[in-house]
Amino acid sequence: MPTNYQTQFNAYVAYKAQSARGTAASGTGANLLPLTGGKGQLTKQAIQSQQVRQDGMAVRGRHGTQKTSGQYPGELQLSNYDPLLEAVMRGTWASGVSITQATGAMSSATLSATGSVITFSAGNVITAGLRVYDVVTFTSGLAAGDLNKPLRVVGLTNTSITVAEALTTVTGPVSSYAFSVKGRKLINPAAGALVQRYFTIEEAEIDADQSELFTDCKWGKIDLSMQPNGMLTITPSWMGTGAAQGLTGAASPYYTSPALVAAATPLAAIDATLRVGSSDFVDLTAFSLSIDLGLNAPDVVGAKTSPDVFDGVMKVSGSITAMRKDLQAFTDFLAETPLALTMLAQVPGSSPIDFLSVTVPNFTLGGVDKSEIKRDGGPRTVTLNIAAELVGVDTRGGAYDQTMVKIQASN
């Protein structure tokens, strides 16, 4: 009987949210996960017998509890990682607000713009729903060159918006305008509103006509990174209770016609901007960010699998490496200066411009490490360490979302 050996590439990972823990997802409507590698894994604890034999040989031990976990590195893109980001954030995507002169909170205010500040004659943009670190897009009211492109909000008053970008002057008064927090936002929910999501994950191997199916899994960690001449990478990680099964023949694949959430282009570092404090990095050489729930599936007596997968307090950490040019990072570290970080990645060629932004609004530096003095050509570099112990919820209120991480996608 011929054997179909499984090739490395002719396989896929599909996933779908379960209705509840203990209930596998149905076989239709699953999402494909774009990936560059990775795997899910079933492991078991080996139990060694302590019995002593006079012949110097060992008594065969037993299998103990089983564990399931996995991670799948990929290239960050719009839409296709949204369910996983939502799961790790334990929140729910919400549509961004749209604001015009007719919005009640704006009181028919007129508009003008100069420098990086958009000023309104009356009204209250905060009451209208705008928040610092939102990304807004104007479809009317600003100069033509500033329309339909992402503008990062870095400051708010009741009647003004300060953005990171330089704007063409609009003398005004402009009586008709429209802008929005484009797409959707995802923030950490308030106490009592955290959403626990369980998934059924399938690794289907097409050549061998077989699958490994993992149920009662939680996505609990997201790692982001970028470097020059590379894609923005994302590595989602999951952990399960240990429940798993192997499927063959008619039972494999488990999911019928899984599909990507959307056709999307991977985001590249060349189209990304990183802002820390009040400045954009123009000399960035590496960036990484990790969002981790510290998943744990504890062992219990009398069962091969864990009763549940437990998450903990969110930990956010990362690092930034750039060419060394001043002592700003050293000064911020010395003074324990609170900082915010925003990464904005844009989709080239789209009109209006599509984007994904990730913001960490409240942290202090955990270290500033400069490279050694050398004879070699090239610049010295400095690495800014973002320690998990020094990242916290933004409690400023008012114009600021109460969250540790804010994610906004234009889709």
Image (cartoon, grey):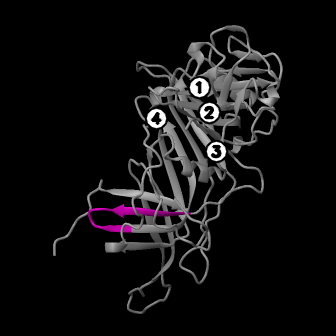
Q: Which residue is mark 3?
A: 316
Three-letter amino acid code at disc 4?
A: Leu
Q: Secondary structure at mark 1?
A: loop
Whole-percent x and y of residue 399?
Answer: 78, 32
Label 3 crowd (10 A; few <14 / some 14-19 / many >=20): many
Q: Which residue is mark 1?
A: 150
Which mark is in front, 1 or 3? 1
C-alpha span from label 1 to label 3: 25 Å
Q: Going by the picture, which residue comes out furthest to the bottom? A: 54
Picture quadrant where residue 157 is located? top right
Mark 4 and mark 3 residues within 8 Å of each other at the beta carbon: no
Task: Choose the circle earlier in sequence order: 4 or 3.
Answer: 4
Mark 2 and mark 1 residues within 8 Å of each other at the beta carbon: yes
Q: Is residue 345 magenta?
A: no
Position of residue 280 relative to residue 115, above or below, is below
Q: How many marks?
A: 4
Q: Residue at x 46, y 83 (%)?
A: 62
Task: Choose the circle earlier in sequence order: 2 or 1.
Answer: 1
Mark 2 and mark 4 residues within 8 Å of each other at the beta carbon: no
Q: Which residues are magenta?
A: 199-211
C-alpha span from label 4 to label 1: 15 Å
Q: Which residue is mark 4?
A: 267
C-alpha span from label 2 to label 4: 18 Å
Whole-percent x and y of residue 273?
Answer: 54, 26
Q: Going by the picture, which residue comes out furthest to the left? A: 1
